[in-house]
Amino acid sequence: MTTLATSPHDPVNRAILEVSEDRIRGFVRNPIGEIARLSGFDTSTVIEQIAAMLRAGTVRRVRQTLQATNLAQGALVAWLMSLQNQWFLPLLVLDTVPKFVQLIKLVQQQVGHGHERVRAPRLVLDGAEREATLALIGEKLAARPRLQA
């Protein structure tokens, strides 16, 4: 497992913190995505770095702006801190896009806990988007750690 920088002076962390503290104003529907866009890093990097800084105590809380995603108070912080299994992070990111319902239903089907059918007006994923998602799911499930009994 790679050790992530946790110093606020690290260039990546500095950029993420500057955007999250100085450039995000009011309610933002997808705050992590907006921080990623404005800082020039991908969503996975932003989530990983915020989680690392929280675990290390570099930051003690995530601003209210970042919690404005209809999660219970503190749930985002707990969620970020629980990202111990980095193999799962790309699957979590599927939950941050407009077709998240279809994507999550497809993941559920692939792990044997449901099906990919969705109710109207949503449509089941098809074509290249479905194939790319299936490839990602297969790759990440193959890389998941095996728990010892």
Image (tube, rainbow, N blue to C red):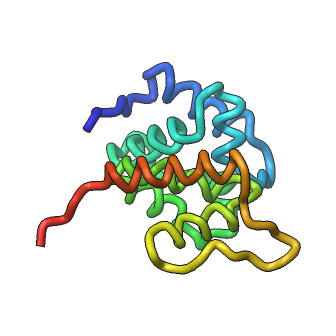
* Residue at the image position 74 percent from the left and 59 percent from the top: 99
* Residue at the image position 45 percent from the left and 29 percent from the top: 8
Indicate whether 56 appears above or below 107. above
Indicate whether 10 appears above or below 3. above
Identify the image quadrant of residue 117: bottom right
Q: Position of residue 70 (x, y in %)?
A: 69, 69
In the visual, does 6 lie left or right of 95?
Answer: left
Q: Position of residue 138 (x, y in %)?
A: 44, 53
Q: Nearer the viewer, residue 103 or 68?
A: 103
Indicate whether 5 appears above or below 115. above
In the visual, does 148 lie left or right of 17?
Answer: left
Q: Position of residue 58 (x, y in %)?
A: 40, 40
Judged from this view, the residue extending furthest toward the top is 11
Q: Nearer the viewer, residue 47 or 54?
A: 47
Of the 4 image quadrants, the one containing the C terminus is: bottom left
In the visual, does 143 lie left or right of 13?
Answer: left
Of the 4 image quadrants, the one containing the N terminus is: top left
* Residue at the image position 62 percent from the left and 59 percent from the top: 95
